[in-house]
């Protein structure tokens, strides 16, 4: 645990996070982190150091800040802006708790552990497709089909639909990019496509139940689980969006990390039991989620920085994860 330095330094950098060319992992971020624990950004403040970042994520004076993202990018209406405010990632308080409780049984570690042999079989099948060739375009030949087919398995969607699901999830994934406003037509097309598809699957499961997530969620609905049809549709689309692009990109970043540290790759080959720790480490030093957003629910004095109610802070993942002050 590192020590938090109280008080406000005058040396506060401005990081232009809205500039698509800005590198959140680069020297400008490192210089800013040396100057101060936070920096100013077009949307509020970025938190750069580990101790302050983890403190904010546990601080109940802040709430989830993602709901503000469409408006921050000048998008105030339309299907995507509406959908965004209804997802788990935007909700806070009782609605968040209720939805999360209804969705989470499918993701308990026991449920996931049962699927592990199928995950392994899929990985082997994909590797068999390129092993003899001795080279691979890793993202298109492994990371994307792996992430997308597992998502189809988790969500009860037919395996053969994975390329289409991947296309929609990839397009919808642009919701998080700083070019979200110019990408909006593609995002809306993918939202409509995925929603229409998920709604068809739900209607099929209503007629012919199976052992899958849509059926489980429908049964909860029928036994008074208070998940409306709209919530079911929004949530299934959200899970496809939240689960495909993140996993695909994190796998790519993991391989990139190992290519930079080949001795670690060799070590992992010799000691596969280090796999779980390797996952944590890769996500610490080379995370796919660039930042996590929070909004002040009241006026907050944050280590001397005055954040007014409604003020936005972003904990920058790479900055906090690689902060040399922290004992990682
Ligand atoms: C490497 C892969 C993944 C990464 C790096 C990742 C990252 C994250 C992060 C950072 C958050 C928190 C955002 C915040 O608090 O503002 C989050 C939330 C969430 N993720 Fe993921 N995720 C991954 C895979 C998945 C998968 C596979 C699923 C499900 C299919 C999923 C479903 C969710 C859900 C439902 C939430 C919202 C939780 C809540 O607000 O209660 N994620 N993810």
Image (cartoon, rainbow, N blue to C red):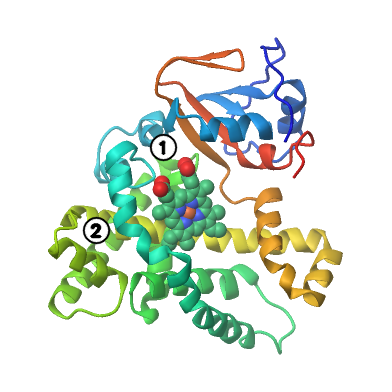
Q: Which residue is mark 1?
A: 66
- Residue 126, horizontal then vertical, whole percent: 58, 82
Earlier sequence position, callout 2 versus callout 1: 1
Q: Position of residue 289 (x, y in %)?
A: 56, 47
Q: Is residue 158 above or below residue 165?
A: below
Quadrant holding the C terminus: top right
Q: Quadrant of residue 197?
A: bottom left
Residue 189 in sight in this render: no
> Eyeballing the image, is 220 above or below 46?
below
Q: Is residue 287 above or below residue 239?
A: above
Q: Position of residue 9 (x, y in %)?
A: 70, 12
Please tell me which residue lies in front, 265 or 105: 105
Q: Measured from the top left, where is residue 253 in percent x and y?
A: 66, 58
Q: Residue at x 60, y 85 (%)?
A: 124
Can residue 218 be seen here? yes
Helix, strand or loop at label 2? It is helix
Q: Residues within 10 Å of mark 1 (few under 14, many from 20)?
A: many
Res. 233 mark: 2
Mark 2 vs mark 1, CA separation in Å: 20 Å
Q: Secondary structure at mark 1?
A: helix
Instruction: Bin the neighbour count of mark 2 within 10 Å (Cα to Cα): few under 14, some 14-19, many 20 and up.
Output: some
Q: Is residue 112 left or right of residue 281?
A: left
Outermost residue toward the top? 10
User: In which quadrant is the N terminus drawn?
Assistant: top right
**Residue farthest toward the right in the current orientation of the protein:** 263
In which quadrant of the rendered view does residue 139 lie? bottom right
The residue positioned 71% from the left and 62% from the top of the image is 278
Question: Does mark 1's beta carbon lie closer than 8 Å to ligand 1?
Answer: yes
248 and 231: which is toward the camera: 231
């Amino acid at each position: 645990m590192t020590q938090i330095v109280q008080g406000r330094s005058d040396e506060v950098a401005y990081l232009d996070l809205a500039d698509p060319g800005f590198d959140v992992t680069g020297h400008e971020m490192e210089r800013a982190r040396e100057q101060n624990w936070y920096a100013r950004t077009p949307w509020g403040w970025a938190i750069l150091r580990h101790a302050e970042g983890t403190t904010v994520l546990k601080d109940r004076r802040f709430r989830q800040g993602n709901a503000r993202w469409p408006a921050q990018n000048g998008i105030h209406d339309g299907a995507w802006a509406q959908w965004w405010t209804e997802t788990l990632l935007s909700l806070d308080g009782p609605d968040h708790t209720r939805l999360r409780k209804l969705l989470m049984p499918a993701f308990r570690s026991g449920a996931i552990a049962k699927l592990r042999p199928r995950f392994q079989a899929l990985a082997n099948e994909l590797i068999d497709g390129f092993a003899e060739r001795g080279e691979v375009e890793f993202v298109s030949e492994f990371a994307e089909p792996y992430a997308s087919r597992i998502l189809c398995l988790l969500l009860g969607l037919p395996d053969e639909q994975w390329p289409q699901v991947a296309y929609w999830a990839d397009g919808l994934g642009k919701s998080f990019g700083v070019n979200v406003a110019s990408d909006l037509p593609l995002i809306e097309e993918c939202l409509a496509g995925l929603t229409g598809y998920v709604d068809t699957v739900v209607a099929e499961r209503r007629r012919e139940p199976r052992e899958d997530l849509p059926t489980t969620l429908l049964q909860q609905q029928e036994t008074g689980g208070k998940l409306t049809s709209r919530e079911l549709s929004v949530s299934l689309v959200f899970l496809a969006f939240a689960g495909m692009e993140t996993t695909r990109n994190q796998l790519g970043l993991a391989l990139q990390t190992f290519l930079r540290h080949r001795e670690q790759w060799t070590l992992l080959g010799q000691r596969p039991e280090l796999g779980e720790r390797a996952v944590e480490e890769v996500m610490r030093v080379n995370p796919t989620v660039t930042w996590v957003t929070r909004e002040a629910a009241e006026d907050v004095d944050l280590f001397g920085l005055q954040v007014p109610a409604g003020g936005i802070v972003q904990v920058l993942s790479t900055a906090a994860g690689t902060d040399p002050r922290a004992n990682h």
